[in-house]
Amino acid sequence: PMALAPVGYTLWTQFLRYDPAHADWPNRDRFVLSVGHASMLLYSLIHLAGIEEIDAEGNKTGKEAISLDDIEQFRQLSSRTPGHPEYRHTTGVETTTGPLGQGCGNSVGMAIAERWLAARYNKDGFPLFDHDVYALCGDGDMMEGVSAEAASLAGHLKLSNLCWIYDSNHISIEGATDLAFDEDVGLRFQAYGWNVIHIDDANDVEALANAFAAFKATNDRPTFIVVHSVIGYGSPKAGSEKAHGEPLGEDNIRATKRAYGWPEDKSFYIPDGVLDHFRDAIGGRGGKLRDEWVAMVERYRGEYPDLAAELDLLLKDKLPDGWDADVPVFPADAKGVASRDSGGKVLNAIAGRVPWLIGGSADLAPSTKTDIKGAPSFEANNYGGQNFHFG
């Protein structure tokens, strides 16, 4: 988390479209911490941003999502700051991460969802959905097969609303990553069809800002930002596997504070002005954007009432009336019906009444009867399709 603080600071204060007062705003940017073991970075950002807590029923509680007291309870039983982020346990966490590569795959799904929503509901003058998805990944993520498959698909689908930030520190728990991993990851992502940007120093906030701006300006492919960092930056254990997952120790903590010019006798300390600066930056921008979006949705209701009503159901996780009206009944008989055949008929009956039913099969749709008849495929040139192909 120390090495990545400049990345989080630059992204959240300058680029992330997010309203801390309404963490469930549908058109917010998504930030996924795929390196779940660096959870304290995310918890710190949530606290600094002043994100307000939302309970399981979707109601605001009037509390901070994460307080300083919660941060002091890091990795303690029942705390809001578990060792790895957990979705719907802590407001501001977009998806549960821990198994490396998982957040990478989740982020591709989120980018796909935005593209589908935009294709179906956006109209001229009504860009209801135009948010971006950011995922922070590490060396371990890049070693995982799940991230490779997800990245290949994202490149194929030209998901230009997706940005992965790769923390390349070349350190694993067992030692340097070249014990098992020495490939040129940037070249691999170029082969996947991504826009690849290299940043030599994770502390170069100007270069980081330029990279995020380049991502925002790219409209034909996803972006992969390779950030070269030093794990445990500022501590005596910097650049060592000893900075990966084990406590620094009291003496090293004091040495780290000295290196940063931080008061050695203070713990869980935020200097004056930091909260106001951070919250004004993200909240001022995000609050204005959300207010404009809410007003646009109201105008949209007048222009496209049927689509607006459909979108309301989707966002509330509800199904339309009569969604199962066409589901066939299969009387019992001696011969019976193959489950793939009956399942395919049920799937198509529901898909005809639930437009946001999207799916596919691992190159087996004709065999498993999971294709939606008459519906187009979800592809780079048609993000409104219902049939999904992923090999």
Image (cartoon, rainbow, N blue to C red):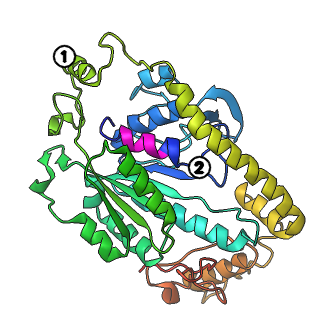
Please, what secondary structure does the residue beneath circle 1 have?
helix
Residue farthest top in this picture: 265
Callout 1 crowding tier (Cα within 10 Å): few <14, some 14–19, many ≥20: few
In the figure, 354 relative to 36: above or below?
below
Q: What residue appears at the point 51 percent right and 22 percent down from the top-left corner? A: 273
The quarter holding residue 163 reads: bottom left
Which of the two discs, 2 and 1, sits closer to the camera?
2
Q: Residue at x 47, y 27 (%)?
A: 79
Could you tell whether 171 is left or right of 137 in the image? left
Q: Split into 4 quadrants, where in the image is the C terminus?
A: bottom left
Q: Is residue 23 visible?
A: no
Q: Is residue 10 magenta?
A: yes
Q: Which residue is mark 1?
A: 251
For the residues marked 2 and 1, what is the alpha-carbon distance in whole angstroms?
A: 39 Å
Say what amino acid the circle numbered 1 marks: Asp
Residue 314 position (above or below residue 75): below
**For residue 60, above or below residue 26:** above
- Residue 233, image x and y in percent? 24, 35
Where disc 2 sits, the SS reads loop
Q: Position of residue 268 (x, y in %)?
A: 41, 19
Dividing the picture into quarters, in which one does residue 251 lie?
Answer: top left
- Pointer 2 residue: 17
Quick check: can you spot residue 262? Answer: yes
| Left or right placement of residue 116 versus residue 278 in this view | right
Disc 2 crowd rating (10 Å Cα; few below 14, some 14-19, many 20+) is many
The residue under the point 68% across, 42% down is: 287
* Amino acid of disc 2: Arg
Bounds of the magenta segment: 5-11
